[in-house]
Structures are given as structure tokens and as C-alpha cells.
Image (spheres, rainbow, N blue to C red):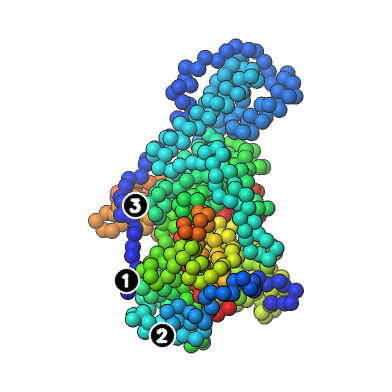
């Protein structure tokens, strides 16, 4: 990016306390864990592999967990969790749960169709936009990455 | 560790087969006794004429002086219908407004009975408005209020529902609610309408933004009769609703739960992981294996089409990484449509969801539009048809060979799958395929050129 293009950076200090990207998820850390680590943790081979233009997305637990491995990379770049496909003790189900588990988020996108994107360094959460209370905002997906 | 649970509905129903567009005139008004007064609008004062104009704007029916009476004429379904008659004096407009409100309530009830859909009430809370701050993050603003629909809107939605069914059923077992917003969902951003995955109650809904349907013909049949310098095909309330309910279809088919990449691949899109924004996004494939994407550098910048590499990085005219959208070579909508491996049917194809929704709108609209889709973009046609049939089989059941029990005929309506109906459809498709490639003209979307449906 050229210098004159302002880029959205989540640097608000108030967001810092709480989850840090190196905390990862169940020992899996983007840019540090490999596909083999994911297989070992979830005790299964990927259910399906989706070819991306610049890598591969591997799906586990019937699509509840998806990891992206970019071409030529030996580590996972991103890990996506879908709460409605996973047991509730594996991932927060609502924004209220996510706030408790990870700390504060900023709303960085309001997608008309899909929902609202809540972000903190190293994490993006897409939650239902309509309901006002965080307890009622169901999480559609949650992604962790190295910021 | 448990494997993911499935909560797909297995309820099988039957498509509703006949339109109900004639029932706008309520039974209770049939015995209304208009009173006599002779007057002509041309002779009325400016104040009265304004009163009539305001009335027509609010209710979208035309007040027609007819001898001693005022007729209130609704244009819908390709014809004009007198839905109400009062005595012909401006004082009657208040009473007419009340009776029209009753007609709206009755029409809503009829649609709720048939399709289980519901509608916003006047003054109902929608959600708090979204306001984007200078740093691109968002916060909630004041509560957006809703209004109730007009008869013309119900007519357009009704026409769309007969075609879009069963897509009005949400994936969570509820049915689409139609909201008519008094203010824009995103402050300072005006679009026509959009589908939301979750309204205030967490269910799928269609939001029409202020002015979206103002003066707009109810159905595609009404476009043909309307001032075509103002409206093009696919710009009726019916077409807009068909587009939005295609997003509900996508929700039902699990596009956001992992199915989108596989379906999008079938009509010319490749997914990629955008390392700049940490998100899986989509690239439109070109005929020569190149990629295009629609985007911008900053949230406040206007989005543009650029050629890009497999990582989504915009390229300059010499094919080198440009470093930004601004410095990349930009393409017009028409250029990208011509260059794409699978041709988008309209100018609205910023991502796979929208390109598909536009295709599905054509597929479900009428025979002429469906033929145009098949002729101009056979691959998109095939992708839409496949998903439409999957939805049909899930909702309406399958034949012994696993094919859907109901197929969509060339007119865009459901018919039972028999050897005769299958042959009729095959004949239609073969005839279109055999036609010489007409350079058919997609009319510029006058209303939607830059303020698209979401
Ligand atoms: Zn759309």
C-alpha cells in the first residue's frame, strides 16, 4: 500500500487486554501451527479441501473448523470456526460470550446480507446484526490470524 | 468431540399454484355508496391538486375523477384496477386513505395465509441505524422506524412470491418478513433494498429503503405499460423482490456455511485468501485465466474493477503489482462482463452472491428473461438451474429417480415434473440454444446503475 492510503488498523489500546493472537485456539496458532497439528488436535484428516487461487482451505468437523494454508507456506494462515456446527464448549456462540472469552471488539464492517464484523487484533467475528443485545447476537463465524 | 449437528428442515410442501392478484378489492368495500359531487381536477385549486398528488404519493394509487366519483386505480399485474370509489371531492381523501389501509391489512393477511410472510407495521422499530466513523469503524445511531406497505408493493411482492417460493422460508424455519424503512440502514448510503440474515428477532428479512418503490411499477408486466424512459426491465418491485429472495435462497442452501466457494466456482469465481484484510474473498475469472476483483483501498473510496493476481493484488496496465486500486488499471463494468469466463447478466456482479442473485432473478422472472439468461450466459443458467432444482427437491420432494417432483417451467412457475412438462422445458431450452447468438441488449439499469440492491 502506498503511504497516502490510510489503512484501517485496530490499534485502540482499550482493545488490547484479553485474548492475544499467540494465545491461538486450543494450541493452534496461525503462522506457527501446521496442518498436521490441526489433524492431531482434531483427531481426523481434513473432510474436504477447497482449492483457493492462492492456497487451500481444509475443512474439519463437517465444516465447523476450516484452516487456510497459502501456497508454499508450511503453516496455517487462518483458522475459521463456525459455532453452529461445533459443540458449545469449543467456541463462543454469541457476541456476549466472545466479549467474555476474548475481550472488546470494534465493529469494522456492517454487511447488509451476512451480518456485522467485529474485530480485535488477530480476530474477526461475524455476528448477527439485527438483535441489539450481545447475548442475542449469534456468531456465524469466527476467524483467527496473525495480525 | 461431537461432529457438527444438522438442523435442516425436512418438511415437504407443495408450491402454491395460482396468483391472487385480483383480490385487491375488499368485500367490505363492495357496497360502499359513493356520494355525488361534480368536479374536475383541472378546475381544482393548486392546493387541492397538491392534496391529490400527496395522496397518490403516499398510497401509490391514482385518483381518477369519474363522473360524480373518484376512482382509486391500482396498476398491477399488467392492468389497472379500481380498488375503491368515493364521492368525488377532496374531503373524501381521508376516508379513502382509511379504506386503503384496510385493504392493505386484508392483502397482508392473504399473503401471510398463503406464504407465511409478514410485513412491518407503521411506526414499528426496525433496528438502530449504522453510522460509519472516519476511522471506518461503525456505531449505532437512532432507531429506524418502519412504515406499512402500499397495495402496489404488496402486488409486486405477491407476484415475486409465486415465483420465488419456497425461498421465502428462512433456513431457521421462520418466514421472511418484509420491512419498509423510513430511514437508510447505513447513514448516508442509499440503496434500494437488501436481504438481511437477521432482523431484530434474528430471522431473515427483506428491507426496502426509503424511496425504493416510489413510483415504481409493481410487476414486470407493468413495466411494459409504463414510461420506459424511466424504468427498464427488471426494475419492478417484483424483480427487486425476486433478487432479494434469491439471497434468502442462498441462505437456505448454506452459502454462508461453507457452500459458497463450491457453487461460485461453477459460474466463474475462484476464492482466495486476502492477506491484507484477513478474509476469504472472491475473484472473477477471465477467459484467459486472469482474475478480476471489485474493491477499493479505503472504506470511503469508490469501488472499482481491476485485474489482479492470485493473491488479489491489483495490477497495473503492464501486469505488474500496482500497490493499490487507485494506481491499478481500472475496467468498466461492460469490459469486465466481456472479459469474464462466465458472463454476468447485468452490471451488478461485485461478488458471486450478487451475480447469482441477478441470474436467478432472470431465471425466475418470465420466459423472455429466462431465454436471455440461457442465451447470454449458459453457464450461469446451468448453475442457477441446478441450485433451484436442489431447493425444489428439498422443499417439494423428489421423484423415484431422485429428480425434483416440481420443475420450474419456462415461464418461471412451478409445474409438476411429468414427461410432458420435462419435454416442454427441454424444447424451450433447445430452441433457445439453437437460436443464433443475438447481440441482445441489456438495458442500462436506470435506477440501479450505481445504487444497487444489496
Ligand atoms: Zn443482492
Residue drawn 66% across and 76% down? B315
Residue B329 picture quarter: bottom right
Q: Residues within 10 Å of mark 1 (few under 14, many from 20)?
A: few
Label 2 chain ID: A
- Marks 2 and 3, how far apart at CA: 40 Å
Residue drawn 57% across and 19% down? B86
Label 1 chain ID: B
Label 3 chain ID: B
Q: Nearer the viewer, mark 2 or mark 3?
A: 2
Do pointers 2 and 3 mark residues of a single chain? no
Q: Where is residue A86 in the image (x, y as percent from the top left)?
A: 38, 69
B198 sits to left or right of B334: left
What mark, if any, has residue B328 been given in the picture? none
**Relative depth, front residue between A113 and B56:** A113
Q: Position of residue B158 (x, y in %)?
A: 47, 40
Do pointers 1 and 2 mark residues of a single chain? no
Which residue position holds label 1?
Answer: B2
Label 2 sits on a secondary structure element that is: helix
What mark, if any, has residue A37 been given in the picture? 2
Which residue position holds label 3?
Answer: B395
**Relative depth, front residue between A54 and B269:** A54
Residue drawn 50% across and 86% down? A32
- Residue B297 vs B83, above or below: the answer is below
Amino acid at each position: 500500500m502506498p503511504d497516502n492510503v490510510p489503512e484501517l488498523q485496530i490499534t485502540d489500546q482499550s482493545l488490547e487486554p484479553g485474548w492475544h493472537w499467540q494465545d491461538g485456539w486450543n494450541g493452534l496458532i496461525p503462522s506457527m501451527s501446521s496442518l498436521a497439528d490441526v489433524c492431531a488436535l482434531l483427531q481426523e484428516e481434513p473432510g474436504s479441501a477447497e482449492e483457493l487461487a492462492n492456497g487451500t482451505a481444509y475443512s474439519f468437523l463437517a465444516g465447523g473448523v476450516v484452516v487456510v494454508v497459502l501456497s508454499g507456506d508450511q503453516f496455517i494462515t487462518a483458522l475459521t470456526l463456525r459455532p453452529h456446527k461445533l459443540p458449545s464448549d469449543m467456541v463462543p456462540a454469541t457476541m456476549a460470550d466472545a466479549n467474555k472469552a476474548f475481550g472488546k471488539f470494534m465493529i469494522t464492517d456492517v454487511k447488509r446480507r451476512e451480518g456485522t464484523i467485529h474485530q480485535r487484533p488477530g480476530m474477526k467475528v461475524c455476528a448477527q446484526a439485527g438483535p441489539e443485545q450481545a447475548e442475542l447476537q449469534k456468531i456465524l463465524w469466527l476467524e483467527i490470524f496473525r495480525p | 468431540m461431537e461432529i457438527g449437528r444438522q438442523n435442516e428442515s425436512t418438511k415437504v410442501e407443495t408450491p402454491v399454484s395460482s396468483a391472487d392478484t385480483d383480490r385487491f378489492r375488499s368485500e367490505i368495500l363492495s357496497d360502499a355508496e359513493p356520494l355525488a359531487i361534480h368536479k374536475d381536477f383541472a378546475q381544482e385549486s393548486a392546493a387541492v391538486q397538491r392534496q391529490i398528488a400527496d395522496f397518490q404519493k403516499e398510497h401509490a394509487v391514482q385518483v381518477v375523477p369519474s363522473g360524480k366519483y373518484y376512482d382509486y386505480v391500482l396498476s398491477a399485474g399488467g392492468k389497472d384496477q379500481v380498488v375503491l370509489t368515493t364521492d368525488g371531492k377532496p374531503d373524501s381523501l381521508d376516508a379513502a386513505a382509511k379504506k386503503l389501509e384496510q385493504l392493505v391489512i386484508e392483502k397482508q393477511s392473504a399473503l401471510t395465509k398463503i406464504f407465511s410472510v409478514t410485513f412491518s407495521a407503521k411506526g414499528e422499530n426496525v433496528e438502530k441505524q449504522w453510522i460509519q466513523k472516519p476511522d471506518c469503524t461503525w456505531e449505532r445511531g437512532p432507531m429506524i422506524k418502519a412504515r406499512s406497505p402500499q397495495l402496489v408493493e404488496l402486488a409486486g411482492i405477491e407476484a415475486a412470491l409465486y415465483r420465488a417460493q419456497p425461498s421465502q422460508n428462512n433456513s431457521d424455519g421462520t418466514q421472511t418478513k418484509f420491512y419498509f424503512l423510513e430511514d437508510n440502514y447505513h447513514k448516508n448510503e442509499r440503496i434500494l433494498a437488501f436481504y438481511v440474515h437477521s432482523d431484530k428477532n434474528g430471522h431473515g428479512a427483506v428491507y426496502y429503503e426509503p424511496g425504493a418503490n416510489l413510483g415504481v411499477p409493481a410487476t414486470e408486466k407493468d413495466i411494459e405499460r409504463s414510461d420506459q424512459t424511466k424504468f427498464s426491465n427488471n426494475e419492478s418491485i417484483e424483480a427487486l423482490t425476486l433478487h432479494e429472495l434469491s439471497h434468502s435462497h442462498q441462505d437456505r442452501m448454506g452459502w454462508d456455511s461453507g457452500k459458497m466457494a463450491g457453487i461460485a466456482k461453477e459460474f466463474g469465481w475462484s476464492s482466495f485468501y486476502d492477506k491484507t484484510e484477513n478474509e476469504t474473498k472472491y475473484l472473477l475469472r477471465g477467459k484467459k485465466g486472469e482474475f478480476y476483483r471489485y474493491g477499493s483501498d479505503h472504506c470511503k473510496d469508490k469501488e472499482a474493477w481491476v485485474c489482479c493476481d492470485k493473491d488479489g493484488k491489483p495490477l497495473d496496465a503492464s501486469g505488474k503489482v500496482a500497490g493499490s486500486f487507485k494506481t491499478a488499471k481500472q475496467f468498466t463494468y461492460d469490459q469486465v462482463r466481456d472479459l469474464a469466463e462466465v458472463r454476468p447478466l447485468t452490471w451488478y456482479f461485485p461478488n458471486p452472491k450478487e451475480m447469482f442473485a441477478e441470474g436467478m432473478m432472470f431465471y425466475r422472472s418470465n420466459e423472455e428473461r429466462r431465454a436471455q439468461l440461457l442465451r447470454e450466459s449458459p453457464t450461469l443458467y446451468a448453475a442457477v438451474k441446478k441450485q433451484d432444482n436442489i431447493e425444489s427437491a428439498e422443499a417439494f420432494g423428489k421423484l423415484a429417480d431422485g429428480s425434483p417432483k416440481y420443475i420450474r417451467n419456462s415461464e418461471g412457475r412451478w409445474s409438476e415434473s411429468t414427461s410432458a412438462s420435462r419435454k416442454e422445458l427441454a424444447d424451450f431450452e433447445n430452441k433457445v440454444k439453437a437460436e443464433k447468438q443475438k447481440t441482445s441488449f441489456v438495458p442500462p439499469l436506470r435506477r440501479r446503475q450505481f445504487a444497487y440492491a444489496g
